[in-house]
Amino acid sequence: PGHGEVVLQVQDVRKTFGGLVAVNDVSFEIRAGEIMGLIGPNGAGKSTTFNLITGVLAASGGTVRLQGETISGLRSRQIARRGIARSFQHVKMIPDMTVLENVALGAHLRGQAGALRAMLRLDRREEQRLLALAAQQLRRVGMADQMHELAGNLAMGPQRLLEIARALCADPTLLLLDEPAAGLRYKEKQALAAVLRQLRGEGMSILLVEHDMDLVMQVCDRMVVMEFGTRLMEGTPAEVQASPAVRAAYLGT
Ligand code: ADP
Ligand code: MG
């Protein structure tokens, strides 16, 4: 997509769980080369919105479009194939395998029906292709020096970067991250912020669902603030910070 072109359009998206309206007709757009933040207090509906975009949950109403094509109603695997990659809040990896092998395996398993079948079918040339792809994506997130370490020895920050490298192997148009800064130390957050800015510079679009205000304020171009399932406001970090409504809802001041 060209710079500034609308990549994701979330329009009046709604999700109810029994009588609870978890996401109440929320709309926003993400453009190419933009980092959009999605913030709000616990229970605001951020993760549910994330899951509606990735197709993990079926919406009760509304439409999600990726580059103009409706993706709401598709299964999560189909949505992934169309160009939306996500990270998981709890990193799943095989601790006895190297960082490189973990990323290559993740790239291989993406879109495969069964993990075991996938492993059994891996031929040598395909293995080389996946390892090269994994190495390329690890360099992109600044992990060139850690590729051959055991994944189980990684600190939390590098684990999150590994997870992002794995998502990048799918060559996504849009990257969705759910609380990537959770539990990270200051320096790790700075490294993560640098990677996100770098990806944006390459034209990647990113939706950052995040509790950590520091990171959101630092890297996002715009942000949507949710409260009780609704969109409270949308604006630049400076606009959001200056909003009395947001201060009342989120910052508790
Ligand atoms: P956030 O990520 O902003 O903390 P969530 O999207 O996880 O918020 O949750 C929004 C609301 O929906 C909360 O009240 C939560 O309890 C409720 N909720 C989330 N998932 C489910 C579910 N699977 N079943 C029932 N209620 C849910
Ligand atoms: Mg959440």
Image (cartoon, grey):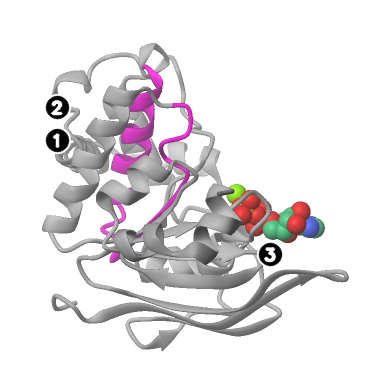
Locate residue 135 relative to residue 54 in the image: left or right.
left
Front disc: 3 or 2: 3
Query: Does residue 61 lie above or below 154 as drawn?
Result: below
What type is the residue that disc 3 sits on?
A: Phe
How far across and down, in percent of the image, does residue 82 sit?
Answer: 38, 71
Locate residue 66 relative to residue 221 in the image: left or right.
right
What type is the residue that disc 2 sits on?
A: Ala
Q: Nearer the viewer, residue 196 or 172?
A: 196
Q: Which disc, if any, is residue 139?
A: 1
For mark 2, give the secondary structure.
helix
Locate residue 16 relative to residue 51 in the image: left or right.
right
Can I make out residue 158 in this image?
no
Q: Which disc, if any, is residue 228?
A: 3
Q: Which disc, if any, is residue 216?
A: none
Query: Does residue 227 lie above or below 197 as drawn?
Result: below
Instruction: Report the residue that reaches farthest toward the top.
Output: 153
Locate residue 137 relative to residue 85 in the image: left or right.
left
Write down the residue under mark 2: 144
Image quadrant assignment for residue 99: top left
Q: How many marks?
A: 3
Residue occupying image coordinates x 49% and y 63%: 244
For mark 1, give the secondary structure.
helix
Image quadrant assignment for residue 186: top left
Inter-mark Cα distance, 3 to 2: 42 Å
Sequence-wise first label, 3 or 2: 2
How far across and down, in percent of the image, does residue 177 sit?
Answer: 42, 50
The reply to whether dot 1 and dot 2 touch (C-beta < 8 Å) is yes
Image quadrant assignment for residue 138: top left
Does ligand 2 reach within 8 Å of label 1's beta carbon? no
Sequence-wise first label, 3 or 1: 1
How far across and down, in percent of the image, does residue 89 sit?
Answer: 52, 40
Q: Which residues are magenta?
A: 155-183
